[in-house]
Image (tube, grey):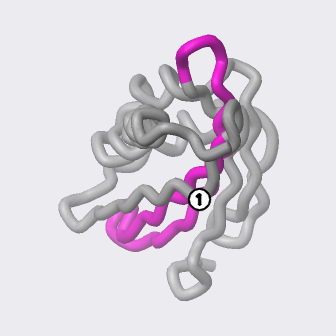
Amino acid sequence: MRANISEYKAIEDAAMKFVKSIAEGNSTYAKELFVNDAVLFGYLDGKLERGSIEQFYHNVDSVVAGDDFNARIDIVSVEETVAVVRVLEEKWGGRIDFTDYLLLLKLGEDWKCVAKVYNQNSNTIQK
């Protein structure tokens, strides 16, 4: 069954907390989105990051996104209590392009992120 348009708006609003944290270099907003035991997987400059979402918070709080940072939110799928969101990022920290996939679960009335998996575009990897 297709979700109502209002659910898509609620999911987009939730994902905006992720983008706002990255853009401002402040994990406070993302901490409203992610559950405490959310997980993270991806490669940053060729090194595997995996485990607690705390690593994402650390990265966000220690890098200024920069004036050229840009992001786009795409809602890939919504199935009643599960949503998949893709976030495209350009020029994080002035140089890195990411594709993030956020797995959201509807907990009560709120959409919360339980997992973040990402890819760093190969032409932005610094060795």
Residue 125 lies left or right of residue 82; in this view the side is left
Say few, some or many: other residues with alpha carbon within 10 Å of mark 1 (under 14 / 14 to 19 / 20 or more): few
Image x and y of residue 44, in percent = 64, 63
Q: Residue at x 33, y 40 (%)?
A: 20
Q: State the image quarter where residue 126 is shown.
A: bottom right
- For the record, the magenta segment spans 83-110
- Tell me which amino acid carries mark 1: Val
Question: In the current view of this chain or complex, which residue is farthest to the left?
Answer: 67
Find residue 3 and report its image quarter: top right
Examine the image and state in which quarter residue 35 appears.
top right
**What residue appears at the point 33 percent right and 68 percent down from the top-left corner?**
94
Identify the residue shown where x is 23% and y is 67%.
68
In the displayed structure image, the side of residue 106 where residue 11 appears, left or right: left
61 over 2 or under it: above or below: above
- Asked if 33 appears above or below 100 in the picture, the reply is above
The image shows residue 70 at horizontal and vertical percentages of 30, 63
